Amino acid sequence: MRPLPSTIRESGREGEKQRENHLSIGCLPHVPHPGPGIESASKVEATWLERRIRQEFEKLREFLRGEEQAILDVMAEEARQKQHLVEEKMKQLKKDTETLAHEIERLQMEMKEDDISFLMKHKSRKRRLFCTMEPEPVQPGMLINVCKYLDSLQYRVWKKMVMSVETVPFSFDPNTAAGWLAVSEDLTSVTNHGYRVQVENPERFSSAPCLLGSRSFSHGSHAWEVDLGGLPSWRVGVVRMCLETGPEGYSHSCYQDTRSGFWYLCRTQGVEGDHCVTSDPATSPLVPSIPRRLRVELECEEGELSFYDAERQCHLYTFHARFGEVRPYFYLGGTRGNGPPEPLRICPLRITVKKELDT
């Protein structure tokens, strides 16, 4: 058998190297020229996105219209009450005026009598005139309280709007969701419905039901909570983003553990039963309790990624590493039996509004 020419051996090694580069559980190989599938999906996505944006702004407009009508209704009720008070006061003034005019007319009649008769009726006349003394002055509060309605009106409505809407620290990125996963329209929950064909794009996970969060973190402190419910199989954590040179774009190693930039907690079922483990192969399974609500705290400068059972308020595990730029990472396995698929949700933030004086 003749040996292969050196050029063939080199091309073979180059092909192996390219296949290794494309062995990525996170992303499909880059397509230099988008095909008809991506073009069609882009148009559908643009139409859907426009509809969703209009819906979200319509919700805001509906909220403002509701607040406007509520304030106008309260103001109209106060105006009606104040108008009623004014009308009652005017009726009383009219009645007092008529009584006083009658007494004046009566007094003029009595003045035509002789002096003795006039003086004899003085006591009764004094009692009558006492009943028609000067009317009480107008009481305060007869006018509409203008400041009640216009004082910081925009701020008060904005604050109420902020407290009424739900916000999350980040959303699920549907462009990274594998074919098994369906992301909700508000991008805050994801469900494993079984594999469905998706548009091939470099950001999408291709070999496992995974997806990423919409934001990346490289500085500061960050925290989020995830509602896991009774999901039988999940992973929650972060993954390091490595922007490779060349056309490959973002790519992840086929080893989804700490060796390749994956730091997460996961629920798994094996010979040791149902338990939680970490992505560090050197660590033992954690305590047997399975969290239903998981809190993640990331300290970029300190190099700490901590996990807590948010319901029991207990610490589960902390990674110590130089993370670099990371994005939230999620894996959502299938459900047990024939029951409906359960979602994995990002929990909304608790919002507080702090007022400060402008000095």
Image: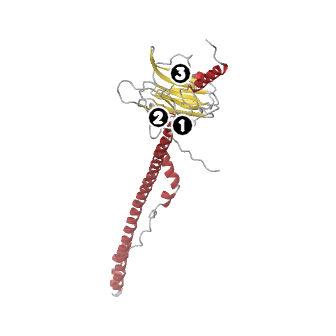
Tell me whether circle 3 and circle 1 mark residues in contact (CB < 8 Å). no
Q: Is residue 350 visible?
A: no
Q: What's the amino acid at mark 1?
A: Ser
Note whether 106 is above or below 171 in the view shown.
Answer: below
In the rendered image, the quadrant that contains the N terminus is: top right
Question: Percent position (x, y) of residue 165?
Answer: 47, 44
Question: Percent position (x, y) of residue 4?
Answer: 63, 17
Note whether 93 is above or below 117 in the view shown.
Answer: above
Nearer to us in this view, 84 or 194: 194
What residue would you read off at disc 2? 198
What residue would you read off at disc 1? 214
Q: What's the amino acid at mark 2?
A: Gln
Q: How many numbered marks are there?
A: 3
What residue would you read off at disc 3? 278
Task: Give me the C-alpha separation between circle 2 and circle 3.
Answer: 30 Å
Task: Give me the C-alpha separation between circle 1 and circle 2.
Answer: 19 Å
Q: Residue at x 35, y 28 (%)?
A: 339
